[in-house]
Amino acid sequence: MEVVTLLQQIDLFRDLTAEQLAVISNIMVEETFLSGDVVFEQGSVADKMYLISQGQLEVIVEYENGKKESVLYLGTGQVVGEMTLVDEGRRSATVISAEDETHVFSIPNATFTELCATNTDIGYIIMRNIAQDMSFKLRHRGSETIE
Amino acid sequence: MSMIYKVSYVVSDGSKPGSIKNEQERPIVGDRVRIGQSNYKVVDVYEIMPPRGEFLYLHATVEQVAEVRV
């Protein structure tokens, strides 16, 4: 699938034009993970975010008592690691590949931030969409707590 | 472009983690979905947020389906 077509199916990039998506596609790197591969570890320095184009990633949180809990699976079209674009903190969870042939596109935070700063039209739309994605994830977590 | 359904799947008894993923078709009650290494059946679906552009935001409650080994 053409990268721009893929980006059009990810709501992080909703409302961006094909030309703007082409600019973003130029800073993306495709990576493939096998089941069990670690994408990033909790507490590590966050230097990029990931867009899932195929497969599943598992999000695992380790608590202060050492207990580890699988809290969420993220599938096609989802974004992981975007929190650090907002707060510049370390990874809040460990993320591993949950199946073979999980394809992602990684975007370096520094390059992406620079792109958003120099092209504020892109920057505004993406930051708004990141906020809405976080809201969706919070609603998901809230539903899990209630149910 | 056709609609894209961004779905929050939540396991009804909370025993397993749920999932968020995009679907090409709107899930309906009775559909089967794979989350992690387990299979689930959709038992409830509703809109969680207003649609935006081609994206529709759904919440789906699922129940685990017993694994049959032969």
Image (cartoon, coloured by chain):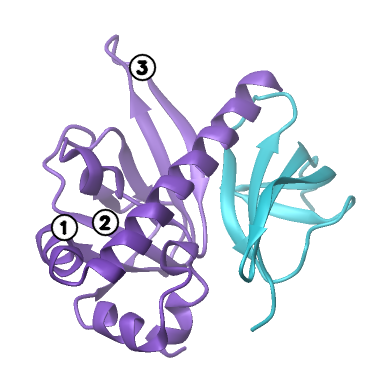
Q: Amino acid at mark 2?
A: Met
Q: Nearer the viewer, residue A118 or A141?
A: A118
Q: Position of residue A130 (x, y in %)?
A: 38, 51
Q: What residue does disc 2 label?
A: A49
**How many numbered marks appear?**
3
In the rendered structure, which amino acid carries the disc numbered 3? Lys
Give the left or right position of residue B15, taking residue A78 as reference: right
Label 2 resides on the chain identified as A
Give how far across and how far down residue A49 sits, in percent: 26, 56
Chain identifier, purple in the render: A
Contact, mark 1 vs mark 2 (Cβ under 8 Å): yes
Numbered disc 1: secondary structure = helix
Residue B17 visible? The answer is: no
Q: Are marks 1 and 3 on the same chain?
A: yes
| The chain in cyan | B
Instruction: Name the mark nearer the viewer: 1 or 3.
Output: 1
Q: Nearer the viewer, residue B46 or A69?
A: B46
Which is more toward the observer, A117 or B25?
A117
Q: The C terminus of chain A appears in which quarter of the rendering?
A: top right
Where disc 2 sits, the SS reads strand
Residue at numbered disc 1:
A109
Other-residue count near label 2 (Cα within 10 Å), few / some / many at <14 / 14–19 / ≥20: many
Eyeballing the image, is A102 above or below A56?
below
Residue under the point 80% across and 42% down:
B65
Q: Residue at x 16, y 69 (%)?
A: A115
**Which residue, given by chain and number where applicable, does mark 3 sit on?**
A67
Residue type for callout 1? Asn
From mark 1 to mark 2, how far is it between C-alphas? 7 Å
Pointer 3 indicates a residue of which chain? A
Q: Could you tell me which residue is drawn at 16 percent across and 46 percent down?
A: A46
Question: CA–CA distance between discs 2 and 3?
Answer: 25 Å
Quarter of the rendering containing residue A92: top left
